[in-house]
Amino acid sequence: MKHIDGNERTKLSLYALSTCIWCKMTKKLLNDLGLGYDYVDMDNLDGEEKEKALEDLKRWNPKCSFPSLIINDEKCIVGYDEKKIKETIGL
Amino acid sequence: MNEHNQTDRKNIDDFFEKLSKETRLIGYYLNPDVEFTKALIGGLITNQKRYGYASCPCRLASGNKTEDLDIICPCDYRDQDIDEYGVCYCALYVSSAVFNGEKKAVSIPDRRMPAKERSAGNAQTHAGIISSLPYPIWRCKVCGYLCAREHPPEVCPICRAEKERFEIFV
């Protein structure tokens, strides 16, 4: 996963696709909120790396749909939902 | 779309113009947010280049065309999603209400089942085929168009989906 620097008050891991508009909007939201987060664009992975990332994501979201945002290793928000993301992070 | 160079932008603009015209002619609507729509078209062009087919920019393709036929844009789920949510999964296509600004386009859940469940569903569909008709009836999986003939048409006359998107219906 790549890391984007910012406020690290919440641990955020984003499973995304480079081509997905809703993933882009999620990244933009996190950037605009000044939050630090890890992200991976799954469509840019290959072979074992891709399989491993899919296995990790499956535990949170069995459908492996995008974006999937894991918050504090506790909760997964699937899809772009600005209100829910802000509420869950406590903003 | 800062990540695209000039050639990419020209390709995106050309694709957008072509798709806008075709879509209106056959009774579908593209998302009226042009920047949003062009970003998705950029994703379709990327997928066309790397996989050889324009699969949904918001879904992870396997790289195997046969496995991904259902998510080649327009996907098999578009019409149902437009009926239920006013948008398809990525929101490239929208209902007339969203097009006219009466309803907002939002991110929706994915209707596509995981691979194992998809193949089980296909087996069931073909279990009860009746073969006593003079012609088989082919169904376009994208828009539901039916036709009775030996083989499906090269291109669906309703939604422009290609021949491989047809299934035997009866």
Image (cartoon, coloured by chain):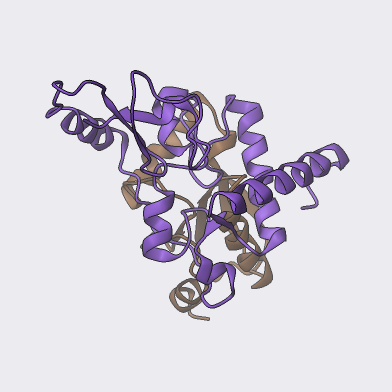
Residue occupying image coordinates x 36% and y 63%: B84
In this rendered view, identify the residue nearer to me: B126 or A89: B126
Q: From the viewer's perspective, is B139 left or right of B45?
A: left
**Is A64 placed left or right of B123 in the picture?**
right
How far from the left and from the top, in percent, is residue B135? 26, 22
Which chain can be seen in purple?
B
At 48% across and 39% down in the image, what residue appears?
Answer: B60
Q: Is residue B113 above or below residue B84?
A: above
Asked if residue B59 lies left or right of residue A61, the reply is: right
The answer to which quarter of the image holds residue B132 is: top left
Is B164 situated left or right of A16 in this image?
left
Residue A20 in percent (x, y) is at 58, 49
Q: How many marks?
A: 0
Residue at 62 percent of width and 68 percent of height: A29
Q: Quadrant of the C terminus of chain B?
A: top left
A10 above or below A14?
Answer: below
In the figure, residue A41 lies in which quadrant? Answer: top right
Residue at far front of view: B134
Q: Residue furthest bottom?
A: A91
Query: Quadrant of residue B120 in the image?
Result: top left
Please say whether residue B105 is visible from this viewpoint: no
Task: Find residue B48 and report its horizontal and vertical position in percent.
Answer: 62, 31
Q: Is residue A87 visible?
A: yes
Chain A, hue in figure: brown
Q: From what the image shows, is residue B145 above or below residue A51?
A: below
Q: Given the current orientation, which residue lies at the most extreme top position?
A: B150
Residue toward you, A48 or B132: B132
At 77% across and 53% down in the image, what residue appears? B1
